[in-house]
Amino acid sequence: MFEAKLKPHLEIILSAIANKMVALGITANMVTLFGFFVNLIATFYFATGHLITGGILILFGGSFDMIDGAVARAQRNLRASGALLDSVIDRYSEGFLFLGALIYFYTLESLLGIILAFGAWFGSILVSYVRARAEGLQITCKVGLMQRPERIILLGTGTLIQGLLWYKFPIIQSTGMILLCTLGILTLTSHITAVHRLIFSYQELSR
């Protein structure tokens, strides 16, 4: 959904940024690894309850997902090795971010939050796995609502709102209400997307 509706409008901006980076000698792999580093910092702030900073860093780190591809195109260096590194680093990044959510809810002594953090992480892994497995069988599988850009935007926005509302509504901070809702939506929609992709790929292979 994000790639279909918004990403095409960002291509000009991304291309300009990518050309500047290439001129400075920055490679796509360097951008990928820097985005991972940002996500590690975001995980620390998330886990320790600094949610405004954590939310901003989650969104900032997620932006490098688009930039690294633009840099690779600007370099005319669309190698399979770079795509593999990007995919693996993305899984690590999401894993750490959901670990931050799990630690945050552990400090709140919220069993529901811990379960939802695990459920959202597990769903995100399945979404990516079904696509990878299908593409290994020569099936293009990009269907479904909750792909990685949507997951990162939702998690980052939910974290940021949770932090911003703390000042006016302390009960929201003490229960993690906004983040509970965010992780609940992520859990549900990620698993729906994984099942959607499984059904789609199964039907395509059956043909």
Image: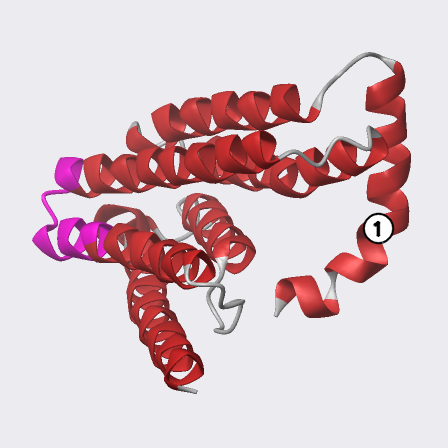
Seen from the viewer's position, the closer of residues 163 and 203 is 203
Image point 54% across, 67% down: which residue?
140
Q: Is residue 137 magenta?
A: no
Instruction: Tell me the quarter of the image containing the C terminus.
Output: bottom left
Q: Where is 177 relative to 162, above or below?
A: below
Identify which amino acid the numbered label 1 is placed on: Glu
Nearer-the-camera pick, 100 or 22: 22
Q: Residue at x 49, y 47 (%)?
A: 156
Relative height, residue 54 to residue 133 (above, below): above
Total numbered circles? 1
For the question of whether residue 88 can be seen, the reply is yes
Query: Outermost residue, top direction?
Result: 25
In percent of width and height, residue 118 lies at: 20, 50
Crowding at dot 1, Cα within 10 Å, few <14 / some 14-19 / many 20+, comes out as some
Drawn side of residue 27 relative to residue 170, left or right: right
Q: In the rendered structure, which segment of residues is drawn in magenta?
A: 106-118
Q: Main secondary structure of the magenta part?
A: helix
Write the residue at 58% across / 21% down: 34
The residue indicated by pointer 1 is 11
In the rendered structure, the answer to whether residue 56 lies left or right of residue 198 reads right
Residue 129, quarter of picture: bottom left
Q: Is residue 165 above or below residue 92?
A: below
> Seen in the image, is 52 located left or right of residue 195?
right
The residue at 19%/43% (across/down) is: 105
